[in-house]
Image (cartoon, grey):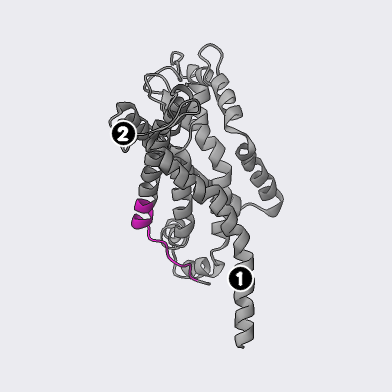
Amino acid sequence: MKTNFRYDNKAAYALLTPIVVLLTIFVVIPFFYAIKVSFYNWSFYQESTFVGFRNFYMVVTDRLFGEAVWVGLKFALMVVPAMLILSFLFANVVKNLGAKYSGFVKTSIYIPTIISGIIASVIFVFIYDYMGGLANYVIGWFGSEPKAWLADVATALPSIAAPAIWLGFGFTALIMLAGLHDIPESYYEAADLEGAGAFKKMWYITIPLMRNVILYLLVTGFIAQISQFELSLVMTNGGPLSETTTPNLYILNHFRNDVMVGNSIAASLLLFVVLGSISALIFRVLNSEKAVDG
């Protein structure tokens, strides 16, 4: 018995070693190196000089960084709840479809997920085109004047949120569908015997048993959307008036334009703290619970 225990330990260490080595090389070492660089005026072309917390002070006191974080939060709040609600409703519809149609629908809704953000941006730039875009053509049916969707301060950020929802909708819906299939049918049958309606079954059975799935999609969704920069880079380049400058676009602009990159590294680390704080807050509000077996 003791021999088997030692053998199991050796096998476990042997399996874990490649993962630990890869994590150390590609995650741990770059992370600590980034922390070190953030305390320097670091450049590819000049000798680095130690500046202490000066880079962090410059980022924190930069009005544009605070505005970029706020834009990222607003963007995530526009995209994530809408994407979750639409995906939840759509997954319920697909669940009740027959096998013949559900396979086609699942494949169809996943197609936007494999399209890159750059291509989606170009497609939606044409849709929002002032002269011949589909968006202005549709609102023209209702007698509205054409809008400069991407140049107007009021509509620029929601206009970018639309393709973000389109890109993430398929993946989120499939995760929701997997969660719905994992709920035992016996729960719904028992609810039917008690005379529960569709809304009560959704409120007291479906949503509580989907909590872990929703928690996962909330955390990953918020992190992904606050980190989004491709759409704003291609569609508006952060404008108008920095209304669509997300945190990562702010960091990218500094990295491209500043000779000293310590400021960009400091901003990246502060964004890491913001994302970690949001994730911790979501976990705190929606406690994860072990699923109950049926």
Q: Residue 62: which quarter of the image?
A: top left
Q: Which residue is mark 2?
A: 54
Q: Earlier in the sequence, mark 2 or mark 1?
A: 1
- Of residues 198 and 286, the one nearer the viewer is 286
Asked if disc 2 and disc 1 are in contact, CB closer than 8 Å, the reply is: no
Q: Which residue is mark 1?
A: 12
Q: Residue furthest bottom?
A: 1
Q: Is residue 85 visible?
A: no
- Of residues 252 and 243, the one nearer the viewer is 252
Q: Please indicate whether residue 95 sits to the left or right of residue 60 in the image.
A: right
Q: In the displayed structure, would residue 27 be above or below residue 168?
A: below
Q: In the displayed structure, would residue 64 be above or below residue 294?
A: above
Q: Please indicate whether residue 39 sits to the left or right of residue 170 in the image.
A: left
- Which element carries disc 2, helix, strand or loop? helix
Q: Residues within 10 Å of mark 2 (few under 14, many from 20)?
A: some
- Which element carries disc 1, helix, strand or loop? helix
| 24 falls in the magenta region | no
Residue drawn at x 62%, y 41% is 109
Residue type, numbered disc 2: Arg
Q: In the displayed structure, would residue 97 be above or below residue 292?
A: above
- Of residues 115 and 36, the one nearer the viewer is 36
Query: How much space separates mark 2 and mark 1, taking CA atoms?
Result: 45 Å
Residue type, numbered disc 1: Ala
Residue 90, given in percent of the width and then of the height, sits at: 54, 46
Residue 25, given in percent of the width and then of the height, sits at: 56, 50
| 285 falls in the magenta region | yes
Residue drawn at x 48%, y 35% is 228
Quarter holding the N terminus is bottom right
Q: Residue 112: which quarter of the image?
A: top right
Q: Which residues are magenta?
A: 280-292
Q: Residue furthest right?
A: 100
